[in-house]
Amino acid sequence: MPSTMIDQIKSKEQNIKDLEHIQALLAWDQETGMPPAASEDRARQMGMIQDLLSTQLQDDHWEQWLSALEKTGEAETGAWYRLLKRRYDENRVLPPDFMSRFVEETSRARDSWLKAREEDDFKLFSPSLNSIVDLLKERCEYISCKTEPYDALLDLYEPGMKAANLESLFDDLQKELTPLLNHVLEHQDSGTVLAGRKFNSRIQRRISLKVLQDMGYSFEAGRLDLSVHPFTTTLGSRDIRVTSSFVEDDFISGLTSTIHEGGHGLYEQNLPASWHGTKVADACSHGFHESQSRLWENVIGRSRPFSRYLSRIIQAETGETLDPDLLYQDLNRVDRGLIRVDADELSYNLHIILRFRLERGLVNGDIRVEDLPGLWNDELKALLGIESSSDRTGVLQDIHWSCGDMGYFPTYTLGNLYASQLWDQLTSEINHVDQQIESGNFSEILNWLVEKVHSRGALLPSAELMKSLTGREPEASPFIAYLRNKYLV
């Protein structure tokens, strides 16, 4: 294949990446500093960038370029072809104005979601959500999925995943998690070191910065800001930003959010440099992306050795000595809570199952937006035995639906499963992992993840990558074993 054609494709890819990063910068500013009155201007600006993106993605030259790439016979170029062909097929069926309409609507919806949260009134968000659901249904029609409409959205985040497979997986998980949750709630120790203790946002930020630095997150290529809902965004190959949210009387929420987003940030900062500006320098799937954030947040960040490490940092920042064993209990307190992002490892996936069932019903046309608050409580009661008396702590708690990200929630649970399977492999290849965590030396752990996962980008689909690393397809048993070892042994 002529090098000039490779250069043309890479140039086009870089143009697309740059536009995506400009759009991400506008979204980052919207979440971290944009004044409320700017929302309409921002929606128009983001729609304009999306128009430019759509033009690039639907360029007439793509068929010629893809045909040439397909014939090279080189493994990495073949992976590049697979990724570009998939993206081209996803975009060529969409009308030129569809994505700009979608981006403008979700930009406005973010502000109506915020207002509805502030006033604790779902009705203020309902019209925007109706519009988003209609647009998602429209997108599914263009894609013409042969199974069910929701599968078309799942495939955007976890290629090849089907709702029927998730339903079976989630039913099995629910059967395992519910009795385990009940048992732990009956027997867990009530000892605590954080109850009633407050940490101001300045101290929480310093602790978060220290933990991110020790994890290996580069502040030369990133930064930490505040937002209503924590997130990670990529604004360039060397500009990976994370946000968190600090509440004085809930230290764990802010810390675990920071670690979670730091896991995402590390993945983005260590994607293959030789492929920067192309689809190969992406994560292989959102489930794998979530595996990195959940591995750092939970497997490492809620471990006993991490509690010892954390107690030293807290003492250095505050002068207070906290019992590491009690801190460990606080980090792993099990509760039937209302809020997903604050949920323990046993109940968290039940929150995901709730969202999966509701958004699947919305997209497939089985549920009306107006009925969501009541259906939310019905599912919450069935899954966790609790109800929310507030829209803010119920159907309005997550930003995802205002962004049009239906199909994303299941990747959190897939991330939990992948994280446990990866951790089993990591600890079989690295010695003295607990001692390294306790000392705050995460470099060998990060190096393993960079070599095995991050640096391989999207060269392999998620199932193939997992099999290449562990010798097995992705499976749930390592996650269940991890929970049993943690809570029952």
Image (cartoon, rainbow, N blue to C red):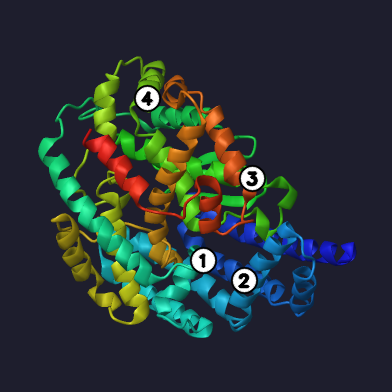
Q: CA distance from mark 2 to mark 3?
A: 21 Å
Question: Of the residues shown, which amino acid type is indicated by label 4?
Answer: Pro
Q: Which residue is mark 4?
A: 305
Mark yes or no: residue 8 visible: yes
Q: Marks 2 and 3: CB-CB under 8 Å?
A: no
Q: Which residue is mark 2?
A: 86
Q: Which residue is mark 3?
A: 455
Tell which circle, 2 or 1, labels the residue nearer the N-terminal end. Answer: 2
Closest to the observer: 133 or 274? Answer: 274
Tell which circle, 4 or 3, labels the residue nearer the N-terminal end. Answer: 4
For the C terminus, the quadrant is top left
Q: Marks 2 and 1: CB-CB under 8 Å?
A: yes
In the shown orientation, is residue 460 left or right of residue 488?
right
Question: Of the residues shown, which amino acid type is indicated by label 3?
Answer: Ser
Q: CA distance from mark 4 to mark 2?
A: 43 Å
Q: Marks 1 and 3: CB-CB under 8 Å?
A: no
In the shown orientation, is residue 370 left or right of residue 478?
left
Mark drawn on residue 159: 1
Closest to the observer: 195 or 411? Answer: 411
Tell which circle, 2 or 3, labels the residue nearer the N-terminal end. Answer: 2
x 21%, y 36%: residue: 488
Mark yes or no: residue 409 visible: no
Mark drawn on residue 264: none
x 19%, y 46%: residue: 180
Q: Residues within 10 Å of mark 1 (few under 14, many from 20)?
A: some
Closest to the observer: 391 or 272? Answer: 272
Q: Find residue 120 and report its horizontal and vertical position in percent.
A: 25, 60
x 19%, y 44%: residue: 335
Question: Of the residues shown, which amino acid type is indicated by label 2?
Answer: Arg
SS for tag 3? Answer: helix
Q: For residue 47, what is the image quadrant?
A: bottom right
